Image (tube, rainbow, N blue to C red):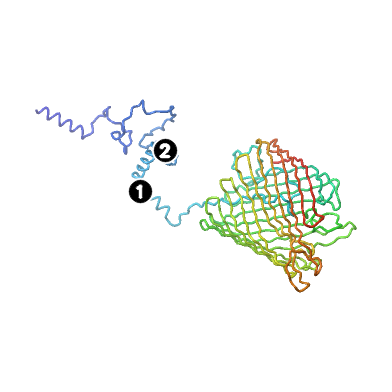
Amino acid sequence: MAACVALSSVDAWAQTAAPPFPDPLAPTLQSDPRNPPRFQKFTRPGLVQLGPPAHFSPPASGAGVTGFDSTNARRKIKPKARASTGNARAATSDASTAASDVNAAPADTAAANARASAPGVATPLTVSRYQTPPPDTAALARPTGAPPVELGPIRKLPPKRKAHSEPDDPYAPLGVHAGAFTLFPAIELIGGYDTNPARSPSGPGAALYTVAPELQAQSNWARHELKADLRGSYIGYSPDQTPTLSRPNFNGKIDGRIDVTRDTRIDLGTRLLVATDNPGSPNIQAGIVKLPVFATFGGSAGVTHQFNRFELGAKADIERTAYQDSTFTDGSTASNADRNYKQYTGALRGAYETMPGVKPFVEVSTDSRVHDLSPDVNGFARDSRGVTGKVGTTFNLAHRLTGEVAVGYTQRKYDDPRFDNLNAPIGNASLIWTPSALTTVKLSASSTIAESTVPGVSATLSRDLGLQIDHSLRRWLIASAKFGFGVDSYKGGTDTSTGSGEICDCVITTPGETTPDRQDLRYVVGFGLTYKLSPDLHLKGEVRHDWLRSNVPGNDYNSTMFLLGLRLQR
């Protein structure tokens, strides 16, 4: 009995006190003290691995499962994976890890929260990069000042790309890096034939050539932005006519954005347009040697602030249009100073983001036009003031639908009492839809009120609608189809010579005599093909037909153009 008592006391001491010598059957000390082996689930070594053999890197010297590492090397902390409902093992692992972290270091979490809420601690600002892309808004019906020749698929400002990134299109321009900017230079050489370059009822045909250089630039700054889009061209005819139809064209704009804060930005812009009146326009004088060239240049400045999803912006704009003198066949000249004018515009815009990528807006603008000479050579005071209201929305839906569409109403009042107020609905759109990786659709619409020199005509209201579809037959072969429709309405006035003061849809020629308003309907249909030999060299061809139908006899015309061009870009 004494021996049994002695043995039992020895067993009890062995269970409560540590043995003086390590027991080979005891658990190793290289275990996690927060998860000792007696609480771990027993698994057979042969059933642990169910997939291909995993590759493990050897642990650092002195490293164990307790977390000690004698190398003092910095460890990379990987972000915790979100628990997946379809993977029960991953969800269980994430839950156990989160529970152990909460139980292990509550003091660290409290300290981190205290540091984040401490005053004077700056938090990094994330600048919003959401901005509506500026696609080309020129209508296909070619309003006044539009380029004379258009070739090729839809051209957009190249997006900003990170260094060493491959573009989606292997034939896209690579660009030239110049400091903090990426430049995209290009030039097009086009030749062809136009059956009616003068746009007259029975005009002769002529061969044509066009040289069209362009340059696009995009900044690569972390904050702020500066971009430029400069396009020029010169079109020549052989044999030429009188007046000469060879003419230059330039359309350039530079836009900048200053990110003042995360929610406030300043938008700045400048632009320049050099062009002539389109052949066949009633504003062209008779007996001139060449088409007078005009220049429209101006700038704008605006500020926009975001109140969470609501956005409020104000913008001011100033613009000037100046014409060169006309030269006649007899050698005489005439001044066009009465066509020169300045325009001052102010706009206020409010928008609300209803869902990511969709932002409806309401915009109200007012403008004033002041001519250098008033009245003009025909005795009409053409200074005017206008008010325009628009309702629309912008789109940026996963890069499939981008752009802007708006409808509204405009009113313009003239200083001359013989002109009635111009009231008309308007619409503007510039949408690019990419239904698939092979097809791109562009819808463009514009409404403009242009000045006129025709006696008795207060203004020319032009509405243009264009549709262009590009489809990739191959990655290097693009087919294009263009459709355009435009309406030019020459607004008349009020005949006050008889004392009645009646408003009429007419043009005042002489006091007491009126004629119906002139209205021209323009149509455009074109088909083109672009063959991309390399990212730097493209071949282009296009067949295009234009025709006009007017309610005034003697102004209808038809014209067909056959174009073949070469585009060099970088």
Q: Residue furthest left?
A: 1
> Which quarter of the figure is the N terminus placed in?
top left
Q: Nearer the viewer, residue 11 or 72?
A: 11
Coordinates of residue 39 in the picture (x, y in percent) = 29, 35
Query: Between residues 269 and 141, which one lies in front from this camera angle?
Result: 141
Secondary structure under tag 1 reads helix
When the figure is inspected, residue 214 is found, relative to residue 71, above or below; the finding is below
Horizontal and vertical percent position of residue 532: 69, 37
Side of 332 relative to 283 (left or right): right
Q: Nearer the viewer, residue 526 or 317?
A: 526
Number of callouts: 2
Residue 352 visible in this rendered orientation of the protein: yes
Residue 86's label in the rendered image is 2
In space, the residues marked 2 and 1 are separated at their CA atoms by 34 Å
Q: Position of residue 55 (x, y in %)?
A: 44, 29
Q: Residue furthest top?
A: 46
The answer to whether one can see residue 570 in this image is: no
Which residue does the numbered mark 1 point to in the structure image? Answer: 107
Q: Residue at x 21, y 33 (%)?
A: 15
- x, y percent for residue 538: 71, 38
Give the amino acid at mark 2.
Gly
Foreground tag (2 vs 1): 2
Q: Earlier in the sequence, mark 2 or mark 1?
A: 2
